[in-house]
Image: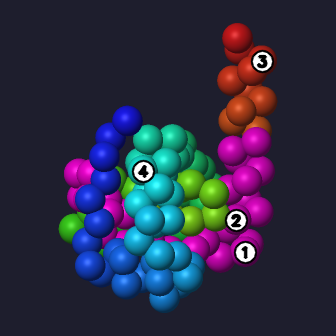
Amino acid sequence: MKKVQLTTHAKKRAKQRMRWNRDVLLKMAEKALNEGYKHSDTKGTVHRYLTKLWFDHENATNMRIYGEDIYFFRGSTLITLYRMPQAIIKKAKYQIDRGEEENEESE
């Protein structure tokens, strides 16, 4: 499991956007980095939305979706995070559920 570093900006945004303290942020960021879905795992509307965000954050080298949140990393350092809009959350959950079903069928 990769260890995550937090930038001051990420801590500030987590407190502002999610109302998370440092410990919660660190735990969630580690889960996102290690277990989260990649940009390449998405398609359609969700993929286009993430692509737009990706180009807005040119310092990031890695993007993960975990739960209802989007995390931007440079290596293993969390740069910032966002809550996904409700319409995108529904589509992302549908894609994730379908992807898990397809993986179960292929086993």
Q: In the rendered structure, are the residues bearing label 2 and label 1 in contact, judged by CB atoms less than 8 Å apart?
A: yes
Question: What residue type is disc 4 on?
Answer: Glu
> Height in image: 16 above or below 91?
below
- Residue 29 located left or right of residue 47: left
Q: Residues within 10 Å of mark 4 (few under 14, many from 20)?
A: some
Residue 58: image quadrant is bottom left
> Magenta segment: does it hold 89?
yes
Q: Answer above or below: position of 102 versus 89.
A: above
Distance from Cα at disc 2 to Cα at disc 3: 24 Å
> Is residue 78 visible to the viewer in this orientation of the structure?
yes
Farthest-out residue, top: 107
The kind of residue on which mark 2 rests is: Ile
Q: Tell me the residue that label 4 is attached to.
A: 30
**Residue 81: horizontal and vertical position, in percent?**
44, 71
Magenta segment, which residues?
Answer: 72-97
Spatial separation of the CA atoms under disc 2 and disc 1:
5 Å
User: Where does label 1 land, which residue?
Assistant: 86
- Label located before the other in sequence (3 or 1): 1
Q: Residue at x 63, y 57 (%)?
A: 67
Q: Amino acid at mark 1?
A: Gln
